[in-house]
């Protein structure tokens, strides 16, 4: 997905949120905003938004000298999600469709996104769970998703945020997890999950977890490690959580199921849905693209 004009104010807001977490020094706040505005003036609008996010957060870490401005935020939401884990697992076990319920809860966890939201608190998390369990959900992709799970020999799950990764565990436990590899970020960026968060969530005890070698708030393949790219290439089924992964992978001609909540108008417009809608969406494969071209002739 390319950058839209509406992304630019979000870049500035996100940079200010991050630098304020890292330091109270208003001179550094101003410097970061000025640098981001300068960066925005020369944007290549064909790039994906996370590529610019990567540059912004590298700049903040360099100017402030703090490796992970969101460390305490991530700890707080990991702890909050873990407190809810047993209750959510019970919802899944007792539901008539455990896989769909696990997807709904995984989407509920996607609200823990400080790239989009300036602030999220635990009451938002409880509200998100309640809404996700009862909201209308376009489940037309459920049968293809079930089929893909049943046929896959290697499943590659791309995690998104800390805290949310506990919700991801609930979904992964509904998969044949001996076939699952989970990928987290290689370096801290915003509140994205790293190996430490996967360990806290208990994922390292049940599946193989690797990091992608990158500090981009999405999956930019050319910045990822060879190990990650090999897993990505070999996987029969890729499950990509969150907006950042959608922004960076939605144009790829590969079987990917995206799971997210559409939290901003730009993403909603690109997906053709309403803001706040829960999304389970399969990417267009090369065969799909060829069929569309043929239909257009």
Image (cartoon, rainbow, N blue to C red):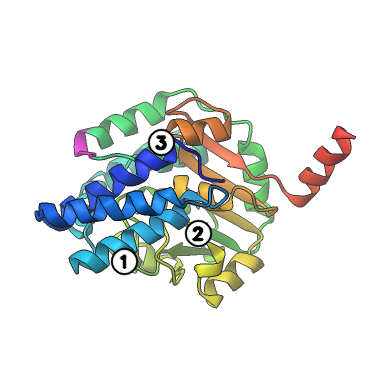
Q: Which numbered tag is attached to residue 199?
A: 1
SS under mark 3: helix
Q: Are marks 1 and 2 in contact (CB under 8 Å)?
A: no
Query: Quadrant of residue 25 in the image?
Result: bottom left
Mark nearer the N terminus (1 vs 2)? 1
- The quadrant in which the C terminus is found is top right
Residue at which label 3 appears: 94
Q: Are marks 3 and 2 in contact (CB under 8 Å)?
A: no
Residue span colored magenta: 119-123
Provide the major secondary structure of the magenta segment: loop
Residue 78 visible, this angle: no
Other residues around mark 1 within 10 Å, as few (<14) / some (14–19) / many (≥20): few
Q: Is residue 57 above or below residue 140?
A: below
Q: Is residue 232 left or right of residue 71?
A: right
Q: Is residue 30 left or right of residue 160?
A: left
- Residue at the outermost left position: 24
Q: Position of residue 103 (x, y in %)?
A: 47, 41
- Which residue occupies 56% across, 35% down? 270
- Residue at the outermost bottom position: 226
Query: Quadrant of residue 192 in the image?
Result: bottom left
Q: Position of residue 172 (x, y in %)?
A: 47, 54
Other residues around mark 2 within 10 Å, as few (<14) / some (14–19) / many (≥20): many
Q: Which numbered tag is attached to residue 219?
A: 2
Mark nearer the N terminus (3 vs 1)? 3
* Tally of numbered discs: 3
């Amino acid at each position: 997905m390319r950058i839209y004009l509406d992304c630019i104010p979000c870049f500035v807001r996100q940079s200010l949120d991050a630098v304020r977490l890292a330091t109270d020094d208003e001179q550094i706040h101003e410097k970061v905003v000025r640098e981001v505005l300068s960066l925005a003036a020369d944007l290549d609008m064909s790039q994906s938004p996370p590529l610019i996010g990567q540059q912004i957060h590298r700049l903040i870490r360099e100017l402030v000298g703090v490796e992970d401005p969101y460390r305490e935020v991530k700890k707080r939401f990991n702890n909050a999600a873990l407190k809810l884990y047993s209750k959510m697992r019970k919802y899944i076990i007792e539901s008539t469709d455990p896989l769909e319920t696990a997807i709904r809860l995984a989407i509920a966890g996607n609200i823990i996104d400080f790239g989009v939201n300036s602030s999220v608190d635990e009451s938002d998390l409880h509200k998100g769970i309640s809404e996700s369990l009862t909201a209308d959900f376009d489940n037309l992709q459920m049968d293809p998703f079930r089929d893909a799970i049943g046929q896959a020999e290697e499943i590659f799950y791309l995690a998104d945020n800390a805290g949310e990764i506990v919700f991801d565990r609930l979904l992964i436990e509904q998969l044949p997890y001996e076939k699952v590899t989970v990928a987290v970020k290689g370096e801290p960026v915003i509140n994205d999950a790293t190996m430490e968060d996967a360990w806290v969530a208990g994922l390292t005890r049940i599946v193989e977890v690797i990091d992608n070698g990158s500090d981009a708030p999405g999956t930019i393949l050319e910045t990822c490690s060879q190990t990650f790219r090999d897993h990505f290439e070999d996987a029969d089924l890729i499950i990509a959580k969150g907006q950042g992964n959608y922004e960076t992978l939605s144009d790829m001609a590969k079987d990917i199921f995206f799971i997210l909540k559409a939290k901003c108008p730009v993403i909603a417009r690109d997906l053709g849905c309403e803001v706040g809608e829960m999304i389970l969406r399969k990417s267009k494969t090369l065969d799909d693209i060829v069929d569309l071209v043929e239909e257009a002739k």
